[in-house]
Amino acid sequence: MKLIKPVSLGMIAIIALSFLGCNDDKDPVKEEFKLPSQVIRKIEIDNDGVKWIATDKGLVALNGDVWYGFTGNDLLTKTAIEELAFSNASGKNELWLGSTLGAAFFDFNTTKLGTLTIFNKQQSGILADNISAIDIDKNNVKYIGTSAGLSILKGTSWNQFMGRNSEEILKEYKISAVATTQGGRIYAATEGGGVSSFKYTDAVSGATTFHQPWSRGLMSDTVYTVIVVENDNQWYGTNKGAALHTSEYAKANWESYTRAEGLICDTVYAIGKDQAGIVWFGTHKGISKFNGTNWVSYTTKDGLIDNKINTLAIDKDGSVWFGTDKGISHFINNQWINY
């Protein structure tokens, strides 16, 4: 396996919304942090509470009140990053990124970054350079959604999967999200082909597909997101509502939620479940949350920065971060903070 030459990373700290310095003659100078792009593709929060934010023009991070920008590579500073995922291989914290330049990772801690390693089609076994989804299972196997199918990286060995039998839905349709379970099952959602489900050790086994008309509770084959919650249950967001699936089998145990039940919009791009058991839905027209009984929704009229929600992340303190096409909204203590 060949890799692009690792690149040393730089990181610039910018104190946002706080005074940088002063003297006896002048008022304090306050430096405002500006996102490299208002279009936020993904937000992930690591075990130390650091927010890692993928934008249309690179990567930024927020640690407490300190924002970090990056130097050293176009992927981190100029490129649209679609996906982020964490790994803890051999005790090292790794951040994996998916972009139009391929998949990449670097190891990090709170004080320094490692080198950036990039996998692209020309120099590794990955299927394509356009990466739309990444997830990493408990055995540190990487499942990478590309524009040419699903690439699987176990150690230094590459494999690929296109779907059950000759369906090849993972090649024919965009892979929008991948989620893995503790029980070893992988769910790859697509925009138009439903969901491919399978297990993987050194080869694929137990493959099946959730799609119309067999998976009636899924409601649509256009699936934008999938997350795994307790007991390996799955939540799906589609262009016709959200669905909860509590089985491995395509036809069994589906619950569907649409505007008729309380969703603010049936086009659901992002889902998250917080520590109190509340499920949050990021849609094309705002946010809804559901506690199992009651629904509450929020839009720009309530303080949200933009109604189109691309991504959401649940913080360690129970607050929720939302990424939109116009910046970031943070919902904390029933108040909105916008960036």
Image (cartoon, rainbow, N blue to C red):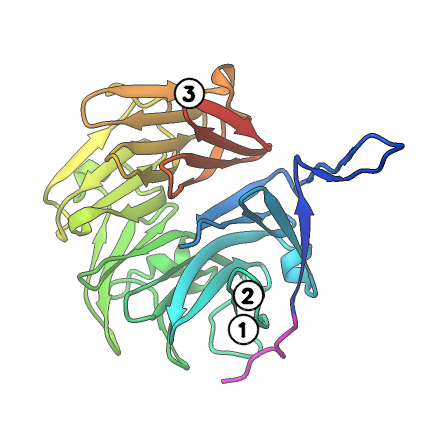
Q: CA distance from mark 2 to mark 3?
A: 35 Å
Q: Residue at x 10, y 44 (%)?
A: 252
Question: Is there a contact, CB below 8 Å, between mark 1 and mark 3?
Answer: no
Q: Position of residue 242 (x, y in %)?
A: 28, 34
Discs 2, 1 touching: Cβ within 8 Å: yes
- Between disc 2 and disc 1, the foreground one is 2
Residue 121 disc label? 1
- Residue bearing the label numbered 2: 102
- Residue type beneath disc 3: Tyr
Residue reaching furthest to the bottom:
1
> Which label number is shown at residue 85?
none
Q: Residue 229: x, y in percent?
A: 23, 47
Q: Is residue 11 left or right of residue 200?
A: right
Residue lying farthest to the front in this orientation: 24
Q: Which residues are magenta?
A: 1-8
Which is more N-terminal, label 1 or label 2? 2
Q: Give how far across and how far down residue 228 sits, in percent.
A: 26, 49
Foreground of the two, 76 or 15: 15
- The amino acid at mark 1 is Lys
Residue type of the residue flagged with mark 2:
Gly
Q: Which residue is mark 3?
A: 298
Please say whether residue 179 is visible from this viewpoint.
Answer: yes
Who's the residue at 56% across and 73% down the image?
117
Q: Is residue 114 left or right of residue 215?
A: right
- Earlier residue among tags 1 and 3: 1
Q: Residue at x 65, y 67 (%)?
A: 9
